[in-house]
Amino acid sequence: MKLTKARALILIAFSVPIAIELRTVAGFFNVELPLIAVAVIEFLFLALLFVLYGLYGEGSESAA
Amino acid sequence: MATASGGSEFVDKFPDEAAIVKASFLIAFVSLGIGAFFGLIQALHRTDVLRVIDSADYYTVLTGHGVLLAIVFTIFFLCGVFHWAIARSLDRPAESALFSWAWVGLMTTGTVLATVAILGGFVPNLGMSADVLFTFYAPLQAHPIFYIGLAMFIVGTWLSGADWFLSYRAWRQDHPDERIPLQTFMVLTTMIMWYISTLGVAVSVVFFLIPWSLGLIESVNPLLTRTLFWYFGHPIVYFWLMPAYLLWYTVLPKLAGGRLFSDPLARVVFLLFLLLSTPVGIHHQYLDPGIAEGFKFIAMTNTMFLLLPSLLTAFTVVASVEHGARQRGGKGYLRWLGALPWRDPAFTGMALAGAMFAAGGFSGMINAGMNINYLIHNTLWVPGHFHLTVGTAVALTMMAGSYWLVPQVTGTKLYSRPIGLLQVIMWFVGMVFMSNAMHRAGLAGIPRRTAEPQYQNFEFLTPIGSIFELRVQIALGGTLLFLSVVLFLFNILLTSLGEESDRPVDSYLPEPLSGPEGSPRILDNLAMWTGIAAVLVVLAYTLPLAGIIQNGGGLFGGGLPVPATVSAGFDLVMTTVTSAFNTLWGVVA
């Protein structure tokens, strides 16, 4: 499936509530996740998405 | 569902109706812009990020934000949508364009009067203010102009409903044996619910608040005005939601590339909202003294029944959208999600609004539970909840729907789909930040409706994270939401100024997969459902209101004497009702 700009935007949008509630969910298991850890995880997700968009996004050779 | 207007655009076929819809949308969008600006001021003020107003003026801003967004923006927009839906689905113009303009004019005049009274709060020497918040019950008192404006606005909505019922009556004469077209059915059931529920606020405003603000009576019974407000204050939630449901049921499946799953199920949902929306208002008053716990328990039970139509909607709409995705080549258990038209801001905005509504439904169950409500009552949790429901499920659906509807009434193509897509996603992200932080702040006990929730020698505690983080989240979310509104208004303005097109948008709506033919015709018996709804309201409210009047110092509070004729009439009603109740109870027992 081609990763279009619209799909990438939707994935980014849905990553925000997951990132925000990550510490709450971790807290259910007595894992105290610091804010910086959440920021790093979100940053890594965005970086991965950026790479995938480069590889499989609109206009990339792989997608064609 | 009728597929009227196929082949020609709405604006060409119904130019007078298109003009009414445009006028309604214009006032709605102006209100949206002002209300959103007030929202930004509040978000930055109470988080202490930026304070450009005096804290005393916070309540003027808060009232403006609530009234302009929750009453004016939503209701003007839904009037536009309903006017479009009636003309489109009945395939006929309104009976009288003059009458249509009359209700637009009355609602607009009422809006201007109420807004002037609210904004008067910024000018102390003017002697006019209405810092009574969206929940405008006593003991807070506004200038009479505010109440008179609201009364005119409500009467305007009644006339708009009459306009649509007249169209329906004329259509029925030409089509005596046909089922009511689905969109018309949705509009009519919504308006019947609105007529029943606005009786409460009409009585409160006309008989108590206006005479009180004019000095004609010295006092009112505060609990009575509160209860009459919430008699209307909860159904108004469904007055906001049902137009959004109309768009989710009849437009969203088409945008997804499919068709509505079930017409009869949609009718059942709207009937359930007609029956259950009003006899639940007391769940807003769990902490009010003067209302017996048993009545609150009944209100809670009725409220939980309201989950049924919402869950039916979730099933029907998701099934319809999945059908659309599979029509577009989607496969698998979840991979079909990728086949949806995510580039289309109208589809994406409505889909995101629906997803957020699920979260709002969950937090709403906390509000509705009598015992757990005490944990979050009057905290920031509550605004967090309703920013997911009216603030996203409704407002985002209305904005997204505008990207499909506005071209139909202007005859111009949407200025920019990418800007529209960015706008709806920005709203979603902004609301995630703001609403999440509000819910968490509410759990920490931070109060709502407070300009400066920062106290000396006291620190709110959060189980996870810090109060500082929550404040930043709220300020960031509020800013993103405001920017989203700016993008929306910019896009709509340039759309309306664009060149006319022969086919600005694909406005065809396909027939449902399962039509109304196989469903019982009793679903269309609006008189019977209206009667049942009225009986439920009488059962839910008669005894609580009687108790409030008897124990709260009479109709006008303060132990003031009630006029003899009113008192005698009231005693007669009370005696009759109590006697009938006792008889009924005896039979049941």
Image: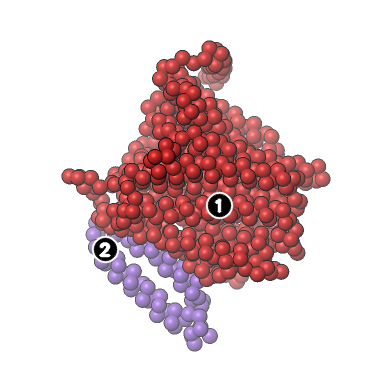
Going 46% across and 35% down the picture, which residue do you hit? Answer: B143
Q: Nearer the viewer, mark 2 or mark 1?
A: 1
Q: Is residue B548 visible?
A: no
Residue B9 occupies quadrant: bottom right
- The quadrant in which residue B369 appears is top left
B143 left or right of B469?
right
In the rendering, at what x and y percent does residue B547 appear? 45, 21
Residue farthest to the left, as pictured: B457
Q: Nearer the viewer, residue B294 or B15?
A: B15
Which residue lies at the image location 42% right of the left edge and 39% below the top edge?
B126
Chain in purple? A
Q: Is residue B499 left or right of residue B69?
A: right
User: Please, what secondary structure does the residue beneath circle 2 have?
Assistant: helix
- B413 in relation to B59, above or below: below
What coloring was used for the rendering?
A: by chain
To which residue does mark 2 refer? A35
For disc 1, the neighbor class at 10 Å (few under 14, some 14 to 19, many from 20) is many
Determine the chain carrying the residue at label 2: A
**Residue B384 position in % (x across, y down):** 39, 49
**In the rendered image, which residue does mark 1 sit on?**
B28
Q: Position of residue B363 (x, y in %)?
A: 41, 47
Alpha carbon distance from label 2 to label 1: 40 Å
Chain letter of mark 1 equals B
Q: In this view of the protein, can residue B563 be seen by the observer?
A: yes
Q: Which label is found at residue B214?
A: none
